[in-house]
Image: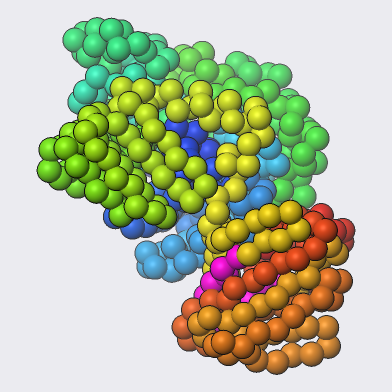
């Protein structure tokens, strides 16, 4: 065991690769839970970045995110750090070409940290989708975790249960560890318990000395790399091979290569390392915590109204009790129903009994097996320059409403299979079309033929809104060839790039 010392540098590692399957239809693979706007505003991801940035001795944050989400996340992080006043904190990005669970993500972050800072780099691993409001208590728990990690321990955080919960994993605490300076208590780890049945969860709470597993960790890079080599050698070797194939297109981005990274076993960090190590410890967190992992948790953020109902959006609940309705795009009315959850988006509606919210994951997995479009892209998509909403789509025709933020610009691009008609409904647009550049204003329009390079910009100080009508033999979002982009997105030399 190492002699305790307090390192000067802490590197938060934010895991932003989760989907949030139990929050379908709101959460999608291309717009997952961490980036959803909460009922009271902001996002879980934004709150996590801001929470990490203001911890003592933090100058760098590493964000692990899927390759497809990088452009949007990168622009989002810059704004979040600016708004939180953390001007001296810089963000680094490690992109995953496919999802391989938390052990692969943490192993990749460890290799990055060793390369950048050496074995003594201390990592604080934080999922991007947790809601914690008590910053002071959280920072105190992190300080306690750092003390234990400085002794060579692999530290996790536990939350005292306040109810019977079958959607979380549990940790049984073992022998208490010495504490000092009124720090939160900490214990050795006796065992991890997977998401229990209701009867088992009730027994665990009656037994005591158990905590919800918060999925947050703290350790030195050198200590966790040794644990990987000892307890998960195959995974560690595969991750090292994938790391050797990574490339760095920009100074703040490391991109893992698809073929090599897809060979890394998909296993949770708890199972690969924490259940096997003898150096594990748990800090008993005294802060509020919620992983917003179900529609019950999401609608708990909505104020309770008459008859125990929680209603968001354009909703009328008549003779309904204990019903939770989240309406995004239309009127939802309930009559004479109890204990239901209704979640509505522009292209899907979920109706579930309150007791069955954990089964939404199984429903989502069925839809994903069918490759149903409602699992992937929502009707409204947020991008670095603004957002678009698909209003209608038929064979050969797609109609969008596009909103471009002040001063923002889409990439210089062209399409092979479709032409586009643009009608300005708000603001002023600067249009590049071939060698031309011109302005169009409210109630004016222009036409972009297929095969012509073009760009849309907002030179004004208010949002630009246009209606775009696409016509052609193919109107998929991947018919784009990008030539220049102010947000650093990958330049595509083929006709099947990514949606702008």
Q: In the rendered image, which quarter is residue 170 located in? A: top left
Residue drawn at the location 74% of the way across and 54% of the way down:
395
Left or right: 260, with 499 as reference point: right
On the image, the x and y values in percent for residue 217 come to: 44, 33
The residue range painted magenta reads 400-411
158 or 390: nearer the viewer: 390
Against 19, residue 490 (above or below) is: below
Against 405, residue 266 (above or below) is: above
Residue drawn at the location 47% of the way across and 66% of the way down:
79
Most extreme residue toward the left, as rendered? 306
Q: In the rendered image, which quarter is residue 174 located in? A: top left
Against 61, residue 258 (above or below) is: above
On the image, the x and y values in percent for residue 27 come to: 49, 43
Q: Would residue 260 be visible to someone looking at this image?
A: yes
Q: Would residue 187 be visible to someone looking at this image?
A: no
On the image, the x and y values in percent for residue 47 come to: 37, 52
174 or 114: nearer the viewer: 174
Quadrant location of the C terminus in the rendered image: bottom right
Q: In the rendered image, which quarter is residue 478 located in? A: bottom right
- Asked if the magenta segment contains residue 195, the reply would be no
Residue drawn at the location 79% of the way across and 90% of the way down:
436
Left or right: 494, with 278 as reference point: right
On the image, the x and y values in percent for residue 329 come to: 42, 55
365 or 230: nearer the viewer: 365
418 or 128: nearer the viewer: 418
Residue drawn at the location 34% of the way across and 19% of the way down:
166
Quadrant location of the N terminus in the rendered image: top left
């Amino acid at each position: 065991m190492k002699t305790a010392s307090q390192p000067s540098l802490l590197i938060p590692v934010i895991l932003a690769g989760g989907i949030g399957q139990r929050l379908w239809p709101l959460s999608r693979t291309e717009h997952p839970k961490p980036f959803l706007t909460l009922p009271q505003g902001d996002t879980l991801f934004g709150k996590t970045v801001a929470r990490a940035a203001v911890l003592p001795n933090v100058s760098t944050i590493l964000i692990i995110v899927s390759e497809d989400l990088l452009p949007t996340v990168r622009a989002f992080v810059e704004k979040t750090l600016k708004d939180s006043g953390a001007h001296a904190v810089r963000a680094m990005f490690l992109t995953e070409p496919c999802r391989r669970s938390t052990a692969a993500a943490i192993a990749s972050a460890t290799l990055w940290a060793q390369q950048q800072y050496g074995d003594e780099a201390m990592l604080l691993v934080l999922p991007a989708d947790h809601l914690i409001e008590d910053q002071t208590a959280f920072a105190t728990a992190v300080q306690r975790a750092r003390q234990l990690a400085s002794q060579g321990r692999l530290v996790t955080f536990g939350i005292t249960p306040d109810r019977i919960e079958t959607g979380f994993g549990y940790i049984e605490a073992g022998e208490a560890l010495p504490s000092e300076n009124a720090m939160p208590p900490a214990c050795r780890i006796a065992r991890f318990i997977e998401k229990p049945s209701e009867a088992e969860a009730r027994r665990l709470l009656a037994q005591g000395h158990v905590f919800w597993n918060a999925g947050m960790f703290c350790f030195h890079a050198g200590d966790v790399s040794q644990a990987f080599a000892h307890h998960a050698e195959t995974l560690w070797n595969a991750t090292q091979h994938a790391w050797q194939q990574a490339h760095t297109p920009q100074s703040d981005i490391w991109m893992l290569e698809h073929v090599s990274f897809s060979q890394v076993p998909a296993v949770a960090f708890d199972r690969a390392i924490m259940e096997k190590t003898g150096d594990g410890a748990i800090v008993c967190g005294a802060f509020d915590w919620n992983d917003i992992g179900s529609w019950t948790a999401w609608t708990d953020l909505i104020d309770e109204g008459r008859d125990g109902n929680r209603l968001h959006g354009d909703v009328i609940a008549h003779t309904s009790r204990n019903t939770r309705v989240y309406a995004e795009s239309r009127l939802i009315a309930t009559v004479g129903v109890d204990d239901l959850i209704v979640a509505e988006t522009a292209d899907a509606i979920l109706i579930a009994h309150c007791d069955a919210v954990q089964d939404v994951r199984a429903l989502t997995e069925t839809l994903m097996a069918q490759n149903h479009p409602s699992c992937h892209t929502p009707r409204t998509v947020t991008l670095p320059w603004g957002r678009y909403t698909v209003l209608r789509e038929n064979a050969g025709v797609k109609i969008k409403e596009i909103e471009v933020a002040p001063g923002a610009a889409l990439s210089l691009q062209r399409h092979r299979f479709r032409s586009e008609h643009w009608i300005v409904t708000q603001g002023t647009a600067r249009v590049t079309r071939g060698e031309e550049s011109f302005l169009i204003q409210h109630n004016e329009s222009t036409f972009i033929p297929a095969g012509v390079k073009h760009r849309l910009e907002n030179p004004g100080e208010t949002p630009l809104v246009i209606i775009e009508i696409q016509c052609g033999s193919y109107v998929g979002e991947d018919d784009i060839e990008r030539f220049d982009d102010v947000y650093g997105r990958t330049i595509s030399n083929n006709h099947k790039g990514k949606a702008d």
